[in-house]
Image (cartoon, rainbow, N blue to C red):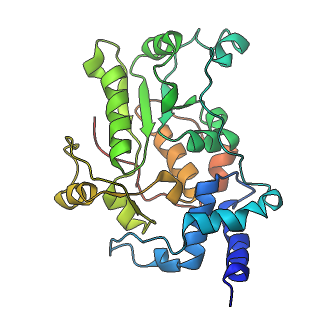
Amino acid sequence: MTLRPLLDGALTVAADRAGAPGGLRYTERQLYYELCRVLQPLHAGPRRIPYTLAPPVRYARFAAALAARREELPGLLPPAAPRPSGPRATAAEEPDLYDYGLPRLLVCQSREITAMLIANDLHLEAACPVLPADELPLDERLVGALERAGGAVVHVLHDASPSGLACFEQVRAAYGAAAGPTGVRVRSMGLVPRHAGTLHLTSGRGPHGHRGPLPAGLRPEERAWLGSGRTVELAAVSPARLLHTVIRRLRGGGTAGPRRTPLHRRVRTARGSGFLSWPVG
């Protein structure tokens, strides 16, 4: 008996869940992790017992099943465009963008997650520019707008992984208080192992563990988890929960946040459990 019909049926359910509520846009990797939850619903276990899950299906098998059905899934985003090699179009198309103070900025480790947040209009409804980390360094005019705001916060959205830790440290070293008298604070909005365990997310394993310094807020078991090479991607969080938590954190990120927007009202039923509140920096 072939597993393809089972996988096709599960993919339909996963796509419906990834786009809920109200037709959210989602990435291919977010759809993969939603499929993992459909095939292996152990994520619904008690939150008081922390654990992560091994993927029940290989990504290559998922990709093969998706290839024939991509056009049937209107919520699925195309692959993220590569980093532009020339000047950013924003500066030319919106010359007054940098003329005012900018109280908050969101930098995402993943280019795909950046595209997903923008596709769901989070940058408009939260009044917060969203940039991928691979486009650093920031435009000097953007840094100036952050400085003019007074007490501006740069939030870094990253995976629970060595590369996620490195992304946060890179931004903090470049733009945080230690970088000079900018008045800009850098805050982690990333996953940590304990939150991945509480949410029972699907985890992977990298080629080697984290060997550099770790934030002081991590527990011993989290340090061991990272040291073993285990990782959890932000894409493993359901799209609605991710959007809800990012909006909530931007509202309470140290500056006057946005009001409850239409997007926030749509996704607030996916109650965030504080999994992005890593107290570092």
Q: Indicate the quadrant where residue 32 lies.
A: bottom right
Against 245, residue 185 (above or below) is above
Q: Is residue 119 left or right of residue 249?
A: right
For the C terminus, the quadrant is top left
Q: Residue furthest right?
A: 72
- Which residue occupies 28% across, 40% down? 280
- Which residue occupies 40% across, 46% down? 190
- Which residue occupies 42% across, 71% down? 53
Instruction: Answer whether residue 191 is visible to the viewer in this image.
Output: yes
Between residues 176 and 15, which one lies in front from this camera angle? 15
Q: Is residue 129 left or right of residue 192?
A: right
For the N terminus, the quadrant is bottom right
Against 166, residue 4 (above or below) is below
Measured from the top left, where is residue 24 in percent x and y?
70, 53
- Which residue occupies 39% across, 61% down? 196
Q: Indicate the quadrant where residue 178 lies.
A: top left
Measured from the top left, where is residue 71 in percent x and y?
82, 57
Against 260, residue 30 (above or below) is below
